[in-house]
Amino acid sequence: MAYSIHPSSVVEDGAQLGEGVRIGPFCHVGGQVV
């Protein structure tokens, strides 16, 4: 799966990121995100 997560962001275990998703700076993605 190809996605991009900025180093300053937090992606919790369990989050499901789709193809091509880009998580920008200072983001917080919860563990139940689909």
Image: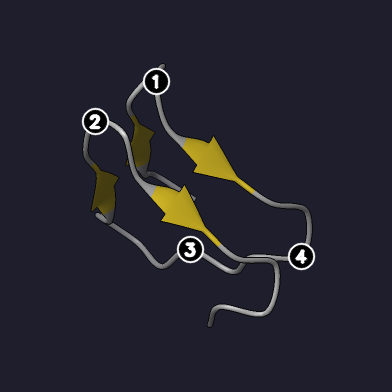
Cα distance between the residues tagged 4 and 1: 19 Å
Q: Position of residue 9 (x, y in %)?
A: 42, 32
Residue sitting at x 59%, y 69%: 16
In this image, 15 relative to 17: left or right?
right
N-terminal-most mark, 2 or 3: 3
- Residue in the foreground of this view, choosing between 31 and 2: 31
Element marked by disc 2: loop
Q: Work out which residue is located at the far top of the displayed protein and give it.
A: 7
In this image, 13 relative to 11: left or right?
right
Q: Which residue is mark 2?
A: 25
Look at discs 4 and 3 and give the one toward the viewer.
4
Q: Amino acid at mark 1?
A: Ser
Q: Position of residue 23 (x, y in %)?
A: 29, 45
Look at discs 1 and 3 and give the one toward the viewer.
1
Residue sitting at x 50%, y 58%: 29
Residue sitting at x 49%, y 50%: 1
Q: Which residue is mark 4?
A: 14
> Which quadrant of the figure has residue 31?
bottom right
Query: What is the crowding at mark 1: few (fewer than 14 residues within 10 Å), some, or many (at least 20)?
Result: few
Q: Amino acid at mark 2?
A: Pro
Determine which of the numbered discs, if any, sits on residue 8 in the image.
1
Look at discs 4 and 2 and give the one toward the viewer.
2
Query: What is the crowding at mark 3: few (fewer than 14 residues within 10 Å), some, or many (at least 20)?
Result: some
Query: What is the crowding at mark 2: few (fewer than 14 residues within 10 Å), some, or many (at least 20)?
Result: few
Element marked by disc 3: loop
Q: Which residue is mark 3?
A: 17
Cα distance between the residues tagged 4 and 2: 20 Å
